Amino acid sequence: MRAFSNSGDRNEFDPVVIRTDYSNEQAWQFIKATLTENAEIGSTTWIVDDPVWLGAGADEVLAAVSADESFKYDLPIFFLADFTAMQAKPHALLAITTATRGDFADRKEYLQATAFGRQFRIVPHVVHSVHGNLNIASMDFEEFAAAAHRDREGIYRCCCRSF
């Protein structure tokens, strides 16, 4: 199984972005620049740019995140820079919740939380806002997933409460 190196160096308020595709360097540079420009005060982006993750899918990365003790309590979501993000504009990352059935009191609560799935696409400029809102529990994953679901392209684009 693939594993993260230096994950203990990550600040709890830093979103995690994992590059799993190397087909478009220009898109990757755009994504990184956008993440840097839109970082919240006191946070950066913990970027995993290691070819060991080439071709890794959401489930494989989720398993590695779940197995890493440094992510245990402060990583509600992570983001993949996968093939779709690198090829299709607006270079929307894949946002994936780390919540599992065991995190909920009952099955009904879990089904409500994942009504729009366990992942959605997100434009890079709102990654920090979404991660921050989830990290402090001011909003829930399903609110963001529902907003992405309503978008004609299935992409979350705006970090605001006017859904």
Image (cartoon, rainbow, N blue to C red):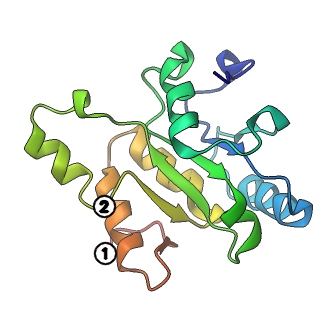
User: For residue 143, which quarter of the picture?
Assistant: bottom left
- Residue lying at 23% horizontally and 27% vertically, measured from the top left: 102
Q: Is residue 121 above or below residue 109?
A: below
> Which amino acid does the dot numbered 2 rest on?
Glu
Q: Is residue 134 above or below residue 35?
A: above
Disc number placed over residue 163 in the picture, else none: 1
Under circle 1, the secondary element is loop
The front one of 130 and 86 is: 86
Residue under numbered circle 2: 143
Left or right, residue 123 beside residue 150: right
Left or right, residue 69 beside residue 10: left
The front one of 56 and 93 is: 56
Q: Measured from the top left, where is residue 118 in percent x and y?
A: 37, 51
Disc number placed over residue 58 in the picture, else none: none
Please say whether residue 50 is visible from this viewpoint.
Answer: no
Q: Quadrant of the N terminus?
A: top right
- Residue lying at 58% horizontally and 35% vertically, measured from the top left: 61
Q: Mark 2 near mark 1, Cβ–Cβ under 8 Å?
A: yes
Q: Measured from the top left, where is residue 52 in percent x and y?
A: 80, 32
User: For residue 34, which quarter of the picture?
Assistant: bottom right
Q: Quadrant of the C terminus?
A: bottom left
Q: Measured from the top left, where is residue 40 in percent x and y?
A: 62, 49
How many callouts does the rendering have? 2
Please say whether residue 98 is visible from this viewpoint.
Answer: yes
> Which amino acid does the dot numbered 1 rest on?
Phe
Q: Measured from the top left, where is residue 62 in percent x and y?
A: 51, 34
Under circle 2, the secondary element is helix
The front one of 35 and 93 is: 93
